[in-house]
Image: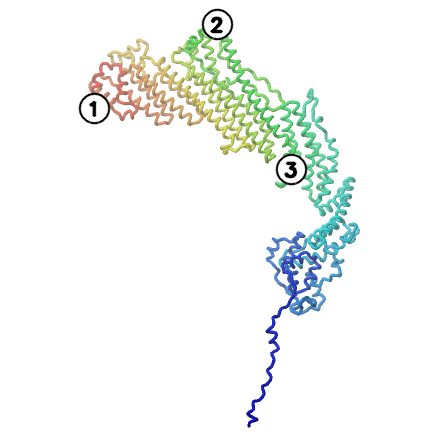
Amino acid sequence: MSAMKKRAPKAPQRRDPLAELRMSNMVISKPFLPVELISQIVDHLSAVDLISVARVSRKMHEMVYDDTRWVQRLQRMGVWHDNEARRTGGAVKPTSESRRTPTIDRSLVNGKGRPQIHINGHVPTDPKLVQDRAVDGFDTVSLSSPLYDKNSPGDAMTVLKNVHSSRGQARQEYGKVHKLLYPYFRDALNATRFDRTLVVQEFSLPQHRAEMFSNIRTFAKSDVSLGASKREQKLADLISQFATAALLEFRSGYEYKDIKGRMKQYAVVMYILDGGKSGVDLFLNDNRLIANKSELGSVSDCVDYSLGSGQLSLERVQAYFDRLGDAYQREAAVIKEVFPQSTEVSLLYLEKIGEDILAPFLSALFADARTRNTSVYLRVISGSLHATSKFVQDYALPKNADELTVTRASNVLVRLFAPHLQLYLEEEMAFFRQKADSEVVRWDRDLSEQAASTESFLMSNINRQADKKDFMSSFKKVVMMPVSILPSFVSARPAIQRTDSSPGTTPRSTSPLPQSLSSSLPNKAPSDELAAKAALMTSRLDNIKSLFSIDVALNLIHAAKSSLERAAQFIALGGPPGDIAREKCSEIYLILIDTIGNKHVKTGFERAIRHLSAYNPRAQTPASTGAHQGPVVAPLTTFLELVNVGDLIQQMLDVFFEQEIVRMGIAKRDDFISPPVKEKRKFEQMLDEHVASGLSKGIDVLMDEVEYLCATEQLPTDFNPITQVFDADTINKRNSMFGIGDIDVSPTKPCLHIIDIVDKHVGMLQGSTDKSLIDVFVQEVSQRLFQTLVKHIKRQRISPLGAMRLLSDLTAYTAHISSYRNPNLTIYFNALREVSQIYLFEGRTDKEIEEMSSIITDAERYRGVFTVEEVVEFAERRSDWLAIRTKVESRVKGESCSVM
């Protein structure tokens, strides 16, 4: 038992094999580089080296197979298009074959072993499947064998065109390019001459060789590995040899006129290699037309010696351009046949023609023209621009040319004419300014000569010394003489012959003044001073309508039109030259407006207003010149006819503005800040102001004439017949004894005469000036006529029998004023007609006195035109006022107080 109680020995504790491992730090020391640095190193590897790196490890495989790395290589070659990649929507959806994505064998560690291609989890053994994967990229590429497939060399020419921009497939697309082009690339780097390359051996046509060399050059752009620049230069030298050989063949074809053969063939080759630049340069620099430009002619050939001393002829200039056009057309046919980029080459050729042929010719032509005279110079420049533009349009521009082509062709014109534009425009402006000033000066000189001739004729029998001593006294006597009625303004305009305003023609002399202006002169000069002075004043008033002329305005407009048609051609050049031409054309129009407006029309109106101011018909007698014979006031009539001339000139300028300034694009009609529009409106304002000022003077003359007629033609017996206390029958018998006849109740002769005069002069303004100005004229004439009639009535003695004629006169005046349809004016004449009723009462009874007093104090009757006191003043002109004054005034006073 004791033995059993003895403790059994402990079993040995089992040792944990991982205990020491747990107690130790498991540190594996392994050197590595940052992923970013490795990625940059990988970026500079060749495609073949990239495949080798991809076999190192799973991470390196993922880094190399990153799609963006292959996209960058395709972008360097210019065959990757982001827009296309976005349209495809990323990677292509997996298909039965695309699902066979390669993976790395996970048993591979630290690059040991070789990654195997797995398809759906299995290693393929079928050679076709392995071959299919080789097409996709570099998985089974043998680094020791070339990728060149001799059975399909044509694929290498089109491989770059068939690259698809699809996300996730960039490596496969690059692999296709690499497989087809890398053998030719490697072979070219080892060749010493282009004719010993694989490209020349495999392709026989020059065009195919050019396409392959171009593809190889494009493929070389994806080479970023060490030594890439040297390889690129080596390839460039090799391609340069091929391009030089092609250029020699191209030259030979041009020299031997093998246009459709070698020349066309090698033009295509050079177009593929460098865009055709070398071939185009050779064609432009060695061109037959440019080399033989002397055969086209020179400036001396443009001189027409049949014109005496010889003048430059625009017809001969045009003949030069015709010869140039024919020669250009032959060369343009070669360009169209040979060059793939024929439109571009045609434009380059046009620029070369402009630089080497037209620029020297035009500069010499303009220099020669300027040495002759200004008019020839202006005609030659404008004619040359027209001929050059026609040449470009007919020969250089293709049909349906786009906007860019038209712009480049226009730039040729700009380069040809821009150096001469500023000088030409200054000469054009100076020429027109001199023409305009000379036209107005000639007109003024003719007027002065006519005036001097007239005065000399009229005063030829007068002692000049005596005339100087008492000029003012005799002049005062002259204005007492009536003035003759003037002839129509159409026949009285100075017949200035229109001169040809086109440069190169000598202006014809203008006749001083027409004979019609001297029609009012007597056949024989007056023998006394007073008659001579009267005739001189009549002549001056007679010539008011000739102070400015439609013919002068027509000549100036014609000259401006010629200058603008020449200068406006340059607006089509566009850009700064076109803007300068438009500005100078605008200045030519401003000169026209200033000359016609300020120097011609304005001056004429000022003279006419001075002549009107000197006219005073109040004390004239009808015996002198008969100014009052007829329904017009001669000076005012002539001024209104002058207004008609001014209105016609304004209409002419309006038409010129629309048809020339607006049509040519010099200014827009609604651009109120442009100088032409502002100057046009300023001219119209000046015309309105002077017409208004002249009409104001004319109204004074018209009212003076009305007062004169009232004073001279109104008989005292019109409103106060010879009466005594007889009945009407007795009065008629008495009047018949004196040859007076029955009592007449019709309007008097002065009334009818005045109405006719006013109506005629208002009618002359219709259609010749603005309606608002006519309304002002009518209102002023009507108000002044009313005031004149009021003063005239207050100077008369009016009997009850004569009141009938007065009422008839005032009724006629009221009816005439009502025809103007202005109620504010009619009120005045209605009130005046109401006043005339106070003269109808006999005034013999108290009842008549009472009725007359009621009319006098009836304020409603006169609508505020007359006060009671003013009506009483009218009543004082009754022939029996002294007999009824006390009764009337007492009743008027009584009724006024009752109203108050």
Does the image show residue 400?
A: no
Secondary element at tag 1: helix
Residue positioned most to the bottom? 1
Q: Is residue 375 above or below residue 715?
A: below
* Residue on which the image places disc 1: 897
Residues at discs 3 and 1 in contact (Cβ within 8 Å): no
- The one nearer the camera, 646 or 756, is 646
Residue under the image location 47 percent in, 14 percent down:
540
N-terminal of the pair, mark 2 or mark 3, is 3
Residue type (three-letter) at the residue carrying disc 2: Gln
Mark with earlier residue (2, 1): 2
Residue 191 is situated, as x and y percent measured from the top left of the image, at: 78, 52
The residue under the point 27% across, 18% down is 873
Location of the C terminus (image quadrant): top left
Residue wearing tag 3: 409
| Residue 883 visible in the displayed image | yes
Crowd band around label 1 with a 10 angstrom C-alpha radius: few (<14), some (14–19), many (20+):
few
Query: Residue 581 or 46: which is nearer the viewer?
Result: 46
Residue 162 lies left or right of residue 862; in this view the side is right
Q: State if disc 1 and disc 2 touch (CB < 8 Å).
A: no
The x and y percentages for residue 716 are 31, 12
> In this rendering, which labeled residue sits more in front, label 2 or label 1?
2
Say which quarter of the image contains residue 398: top right
Question: How far is disc 2 from disc 1 in space, using C-alphas?
Answer: 71 Å
Left-right relation of 495 to 100 = left
